[in-house]
Image: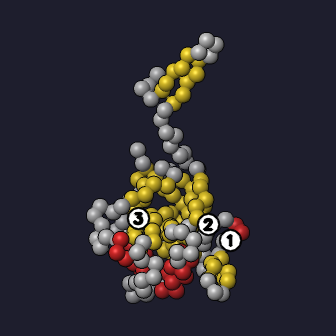
Amino acid sequence: MGPATLLVRGSSFDYRHSTRKEQPVDGARETLHATAISLGDRAALIRGPSGSGKSDIALRCLACAPTSLVREPSRLISDDQVIVTRRGASLIASAPAAIAGKLEVRGIGIVPVASQQSATIVMCVELASAHRMERMPDPWPMTSILGISIPILQVDAGAHATPIKILLALSLSLLPQPQVCD
């Protein structure tokens, strides 16, 4: 019996309880309140409170690529709800069937857009005010989803350059690699 296992003996039972936190297993899934976009097989998970601009950022990403800086088009994976599935040391983003290929455009409604079924999440985009963001984070801040640690890119939702910053981060492969959390 390892040090992380407690043995409780009662008068008529022998109860074993592990004090170790259960690690998510391959195939574990979670639905997150987020939006996900992709550039090829790499995805960014965009998180923020309701009304913070997640869908607007996705719309601007879809509209700005390809460019001279980002040579391939971006695609929507899912808007508002993202299914995240763990596959080995990777996280895969996909859309619930009911909302696949649909993006909410405030003031217009739900519109069909270029979409992709799934992609590997390589970063989490967090919406922050400009005065809270580090200019050149070193090391990158990290977050954990389903036991996988991924880098966080903080952006100002209203800044004009935000979509291109997200797409550059996805295309340049400058991000730390996702890691299984200990």
Nearest the viewer among 153 and 69 is 153
- Is the residue under label 1 in contact with that under label 2 (CB below 8 Å)? yes
Residue wearing tag 1: 99
- Is the residue under label 1 in contact with that under label 3 (CB below 8 Å)? no
Q: Residue at x 56, y 63 (%)?
A: 93
Vertical relation: 63 (above or below) 48 = below
Residue wearing tag 3: 152
- Structural distance between the alpha carbons of marks 3 and 1: 25 Å
Q: Is 180 on the left or on the right of 34, as rendered?
A: left
Residue wearing tag 2: 81
Q: Residue at x 44, y 29 (%)?
A: 4
Name which of mark 3 and mark 1 comes first in the sequence.
Answer: 1
Quadrant in the picture for residue 68: bottom left
- Structural distance between the alpha carbons of marks 2 and 1: 8 Å
x then y, percent, for residue 155: 41, 74
Indicate the quadrant containing the C terminus: top left, top right, bottom left or bottom right: top left
Q: Amino acid at mark 1?
A: Ile
Q: What secondary structure is found at the residue carrying circle 2?
A: strand
Asked whether residue 41 appears in the rendered view, the answer is no
Q: Amino acid at mark 3?
A: Ile
Q: Is 102 on the left or on the right of 71, as rendered?
A: right
Q: Residue at x 36, y 61 (%)?
A: 141
Q: Is 76 on the left or on the right of 72, as rendered?
A: right
Asked whether residue 4 appears in the rendered view, the answer is yes
Q: Sort mark 3 into few (<14), some (14-19) or many (20+) by Cα contacts within 10 Å.
A: many
Q: Amino acid at mark 2?
A: Gln
Nearest the viewer among 15 and 40 is 15
